[in-house]
Amino acid sequence: MIDSWLSNTKFKVDTEFIHKEKFLEKYDVQDAKYPSAYLLEDGSLRLLISQEEIDQVTTITEMEDLVSTKLK
């Protein structure tokens, strides 16, 4: 649901949702906590939304607002 919302926002962010095992295979982030969201910029990952922030979200609208705020 959030991936279709992201593709229809002004941010035009490509998304990839992957499980922990695949994430660790693909990216070298040793201290990652899950769930979390990262932004890939110039070949480097940057933490966009922390596990603690995601844990506070209770609705899709709250998640949309959080993502929008972080991508500004």
Image (cartoon, rainbow, N blue to C red):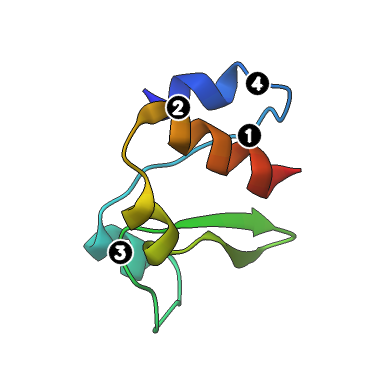
User: Mark 3 and mark 1 in contact (Cβ < 8 Å)?
Assistant: no
Q: Position of residue 20 (x, y in %)?
A: 26, 62
Report the residue marked by disc 2. 61
x 28%, y 59%: residue: 22
Q: Residues within 10 Å of mark 3 (few under 14, many from 20)?
A: few
Under tag 1, what secondary structure?
loop
Q: Amino acid at mark 4?
A: Thr
Q: Amino acid at mark 2?
A: Thr
User: Mark 1 and mark 4 in contact (Cβ < 8 Å)?
Assistant: yes
Q: Amino acid at mark 1?
A: Val
Q: Is residue 31 above or below residue 40?
A: below
User: Mark 4 and mark 3 in contact (Cβ < 8 Å)?
Assistant: no
**Corner quadrant of residue 27:** bottom left
CA–CA distance in space, label 4 to label 1:
8 Å
Q: Amino acid at mark 3?
A: Tyr
**Corner quadrant of residue 46:** bottom right
Q: Residues within 10 Å of mark 2 (few under 14, many from 20)?
A: few
Report the residue marked by disc 4. 9
CA–CA distance in space, label 2 to label 3:
20 Å
Quarter holding the C terminus is top right
